[in-house]
Image (tube, rainbow, N blue to C red):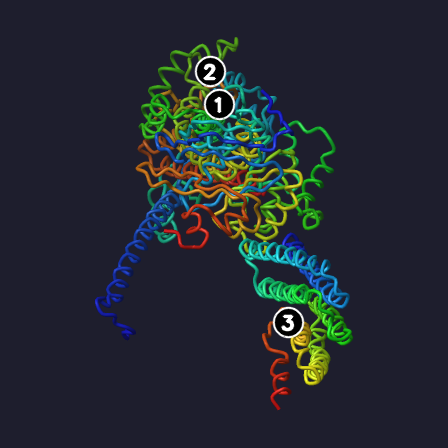
Amino acid sequence: MALNNNFDQKYIIETRNLDIYYGSFKAVAGVNMRVERNAITAIIGPSGCGKSTLLRAFNRMNELYADTSIEGEVTFSGQDIYARDVDPVEVRYRIGMVFQKPNPFPKSIYENIAWTARIHGYKGNMDELVENSLRQAALWDEVKDKLKQSGLSLSGGQQQRLCIARALSIKPEVILMDEPASALDPIATLKIEELMQDLKQNYTIVIVTHNMQQAARASDYTAMMMLTNGESRSGTVIEFDETNIIFTRPKDKRTEDYVTGRFG
Amino acid sequence: MIRKTFEHELQEVKDDILVLGSMVEEAILASVEALKKRDIEAAKNILIADRDINKKRFEIENKLMILIATQQPMAHDLRLLASSMEIISELERMGDYAKGIANINIRMGDEPLLKPLIDIPRMAQKDVDMLHRALTAFVEEDVEAAQAIPMEDDEVDALYNQVYRELMTFVISDPKAIERANWLLWVAHNLERVADRVTNICERTIFIATGELKEIKNSDDEFWKQHNS
Amino acid sequence: MKEIAIVQGFENNLDSRNRKGIIWHVLFQASTIVGIIALIALMLNVIDSAFGYVAYEARMDPDSLTVDGIPVEDQSKDQLVALLQSTLSSGAYNKLDNETLFVDRSREEVFQLVVERIIRPKIVQVWKFWPSLTRSDEIRATVTREYPKAELDFVSWLTYDFVTRPQTSEPLTAGVRTAVLGSLWTILFTILLAFPLGVGAAIYLEEYASENWFNRIIQTNINNLAGVPSIVYGILGLAIFVRALERFTSGKMFGIVNLTSENGRTVLSAGLTLGLLVLPIIIINAQEAIRAVPRSLRNASFGVGATKWQTVWSHMLPNALPGILTGTILAISRAIGETAPLVVVGASTAISFDPSSPFSKFTTLPIQIYQWTSRPQEEFRSLAAASILVLLVLLLSLNASAVLLRNRFSRRF
């Protein structure tokens, strides 16, 4: 079944009572979250609280890790992406991903994008697509004279933007970013954040970051995750609100402690 | 450009401060104009306008706080945001002076003015002129202008002294005029204070641009020196 | 050493820690040196046998073959053929003619036959390299005294002719061409069988097989098979390829009537047997190589919506290929040196004609070496030493070409 994007809906991704398991261990419990279209939603929280696990549940990347399963529901434009007749490949096509460590393919800059487009059956003008994708990722001017060079020859920040360009080339609706700037220097980080602001005109972005300043700077909505105090120690979203509110007058004491650095 | 979103938001804050400034300028001129015409209705409108000024100030303050919380401003950006906090509070106080003048107007009721107003409107005009240029200097971070404007405070002080002496003459010749003279003295005093607060805005402008925090000139000291001697 | 700081509660034990370090350093170095010495000793031993003085007598004096004042070495091909025809029995002559028509043989080959069949030099004594160098006067004296008719030559057993001549029973004219070709044919089938099967199995096990008891048993078995003694594979090969699949391995199935081999003891059987032998090694190495492809690359591919097959074909395989090739090189090196399973599968010890098809009888270099070293005469040891050098060169050049191939793949980016 192909996933359709119902543009009438304000929220592009919604979870309902989402639990995520590694084997029998419940890593994430009871998440109810709505990701608004054309906005940047950040997921913050201390290490090991399941931020990345939750993010990967949004495009079924978790299934590549051994023995994961979910309970509850994740919908994309109202359709259950875990439904029996939905192919995870289709989900990952509509909901792209950028990873913590820049991971361009060990191919040329051009091929990084061309390969991605080709596997999805792109038949149009490839040069144009490559240029457009690189322009959208604010990388074109830096690499236009060396498209035949290896993607790995670029600097870390450029590699990450190449990965973003690659994700954009197949025109997904949502881009998930898993700590996209944690391996980058501050300037490269700011460039990525600025890029996200440009991209949200046309895309929806969900970003996991353990740098809460980054969430504060770059996002419109912030989900605060934390381990529950129960026996199971599962991660869950304890507060989800506008970023401005989370960072100036959070409602949950634990959020306050975390954003003021008094956590623990 | 990196951080163009943040730059854009900083520009918005500056624009908001200019809007607040023009609201204050208008209130000052209108309060003196209403007094001159003894227009109670206009004075009441000024009280209402002051609420808008306060509202605008809180709105800007909230924006500033969110920017500080979310954008982690450093160096120049931090000075700009912190000083903007100070400047909007100065502007709000100026709005309060205009409100004070309007209140005096209302309390005067039916009583006519002790004398036709000449120097007081000039003071108001001077205040507004200084404030306008001070805010322009703030937006453009024009250090030279910010250093020059406080020197003009002397003119306002001189006008105040003139109004003071004039009113004293009235009081000496007719002690029954003391209350009406006092009202006008308060008005003049409020206008004198406005110029002092313009000086504070200029100090902040210099701080934003250079990082140096220093008092340009304490006009209060000079004023009292003159009056005690 | 001067003590820089003593902190209360801590013993300043830097000296004793350093001493321990030095002891281990020396031990590790010693092990390396022992290894190197062993290797050098091996090489010296081989070289010692492969060169040296040889004293030989001709069974028929070449001078007696001079015709019209032309010595036998300078005679034309026709003269030499006539000489053979007149000297050898007609049966022996016809047999030679049957193998290859004399018309098709070159003058050199005919001359070689004259030397082998008529002059028939006979080695009376050989000396190793070291004595040949240090005691040449003494050797000369011995030869003059004991074998007055013998000629004394300093020879290198390893020559171009040695590599290009077929095997014979005469040490002076024996070569290893048959064995080298046999080894190459065998290895060809080993690679053809083991490489695609091994890589395919590795991809399945790493990428497709789910984590269950059945696949775990398969994995354990593969790991264990890699350690099974090679003779067991020989018995397996004998049972399967030589006996059970005889119609296939002997070529009968394809209507090939082979003059030299009616049974399944062929190059094909040997290659397939060695293929089975190295298959587990190739699988394990290929699995290792696939597992070593960074997770981030898999994520990158799946993250842009690639299917499993697209990911495996475009990213996993190209990036694992250098590792897979390294594993294959190691496996092939092992296969090329194997002797025992080939003996069981039925390598011939003495054949003088080259393998020409998958269904030929064969011998291989290690078999040849094994056979020569088991002969009592000293001169065969020298032949074996020379063959060892050939085997080493063959091995090194196979490895080198594989390394070049691998570097070509890993240099892509």
- Badge 1 is on which residue? C353
A236 sits left or right of C23 in the view? right
Q: Residue at x 71, y 40 (%)?
A: A132
Cβ atoms at labels 2 and 1 below 8 Å apart: yes
- The residue nearer to you, when weighing C21 against C165, is C21
Find residue A222 and report its horizontal and vertical position in percent. 52, 44
Number of residues whose C-alpha sits closer than 10 Å to that of mark 3, classed few (under 14), some (14–19) or many (20 or more): many
- Asked if badges 3 and 2 are on one and the same chain, I answer no
Quadrant where the N terminus of chain B is found in the figure:
bottom right
Disc 3 residue type?
A: Arg
Q: CA distance from mark 3 to mark 2?
A: 116 Å
- In the picture, residue C74 is in which quadrant? top right
Q: Are marks 2 and 1 on the same chain?
A: yes
Nearer to us of marks 3 and 1 is 3
- Which amino acid type corresponds to the residue marked 1 in the rendered image? Phe
- Residue closest to the eye, B56 or C203: B56
Q: Are marks 3 and 2 in contact (CB under 8 Å)?
A: no
For label 3, the residue is B197
Task: Tell me if residue A187 can be seen.
Answer: yes
Q: Which dot marks residue C260? A: 2
Q: How far separated are the C-alphas under marks 3 and 1? A: 113 Å
Residue B215 placement: quadrant = bottom right
Instruction: Report the side of B162 relative to C174 (left or right).
Output: right
**Helix, strand or loop at mark 1:** loop
Q: Is residue A66 above or below residue B127?
A: above
The residue at the far bottom in this view is: B229
Which class describes the residues within 10 Å of circle 2: few (<14), some (14-19), or many (20+)? Answer: some
Subunit of label 3: B
Q: Position of residue B121 (x, y in %)?
A: 76, 72
| Residue B218 vertical position relative to residue C345 in the rendered view, above or below | below
Q: Nearer the viewer, residue B203 or A165?
A: B203
Quarter of the image that includes the C terminus of chain B: bottom right
